[in-house]
Image (cartoon, rainbow, N blue to C red):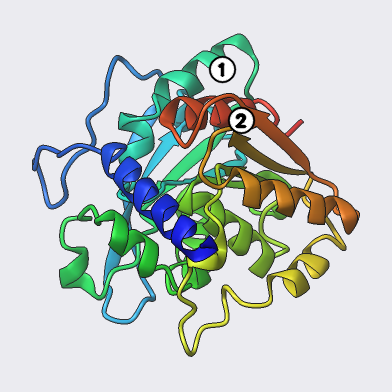
Amino acid sequence: MRRACRTVAFLALVLLLQSCAAGKYALNSQYPQVNVKGNPQGILEEVLYPSSEPGMVERRAYVYLPKDYYESGERYPVFYLLHGARGNECVWIEKGNLLHNIDSLCASGAMLPTIVVLPNANQYNDADDYGKARLKSALEAFYEVDGTVESRFVNDVVASTDSLFRTIPDKEHRALAGMSIGAMQAIHMSANFPDAFGYVGMFSPMVSSFIKAGPDNGFYRKLNDKLAVQFQNPPRLYAVMIGATDFFENSITEWDRELTRKGYPHEFHIAPGGHEWYNWEEFCNQFMQRLWK
């Protein structure tokens, strides 16, 4: 009975995520270009960085720089923000109003100037499969997560960002967050690289019991052991946020109790609503206001 209920909930979640998918993009160059609304005050740049994954040559990320980045000469902290199932590097801009929200928060002084990096964290078979940063089906997104991308994130994405931009390249000036699958990736990335990220945000994290751990990749294994190491020098902010009617609310509430029982400093927030963009946008806004303070 429990397995049947879990299967029904999972299928319902797949249908929901299909409805939350990003739209199609106009093909103006090698890769489809993001659909930017309004008049962003910062500087949006497309970055192609080399990939160390087998069969992959490069991936793309969008990077949003403070408006005076090229005049200031200053170094900036970095916020890495991950998408969810059927998303890619465009989805937070197109579905989450990210650029407008960053501009508004910075203008009011609620958010400090920050470099924001939007990578593509989907698992692809090779460069041909990656194609033009193709969107993946919900089933692909669920069952192909195996640590291949995540285990290379610091080497590929973080190192490339530090080499291309004036970052402050240390744990205290790096943040990592994501929604749904991206939130689950953030849990495990920060645990596998405990010296990399000083701020970690998890917006409606998908439970990792759905993950297919690869036979030669222990990235998603032994989380409890990795958390014990991570929380010897804990992140300055470790925030879990979820909706009261989210598919994963019960499991994540249990995980919050476990973190509390072990004495790991963290925050846990439950908001009205479910596994939806209105929550992820608000969670992200709340998280960004807490960075570097």
The residue drawn where x is 41% and y is 48% is: 84
Q: Earlier in the sequence, mark 1 or mark 2?
A: 1
- Quadrant for residue 154, please give it: bottom right
The residue drawn where x is 61% and y is 63% is: 188
Q: Secondary structure at mark 1?
A: helix
Q: At which x and y percent is residue 270?
A: 66, 31
* Residue to which mark 2 is pinned: 288
The residue drawn where x is 64% and y is 47% is: 250
- Quadrant for residue 241, please give it: top right
Please say if the residues under marks 1 and 2 sit with CB atoms less than 8 Å apart: yes
Residue 91 visible in image? yes
Amino acid type at mark 1:
Leu
Left/right placement of residue 152 relative to residue 136 reads right
Spatial distance from mark 1 to mark 2, Cα to Cα? 8 Å
Q: At which x and y percent is residue 104?
A: 51, 14
Residue 58, relative to residue 261: is it above or below?
below
Q: At which x and y percent is residue 159?
A: 51, 62
Q: Residue furthest front?
A: 1
Q: At which x and y percent is residue 22?
A: 26, 39
Amino acid type at mark 2:
Met
Residue 166 visible in image? no
Residue 12, relative to residue 99: is it above or below?
below
Residue 136, relative to residue 21: is it above or below?
below
Looking at the rendered structure, the number of numbered marks drawn on it comes to 2
Closer to the camera in the image, 248 or 120:
248
Residue 105, disc: 1
The residue drawn where x is 79% and y is 45% is: 266
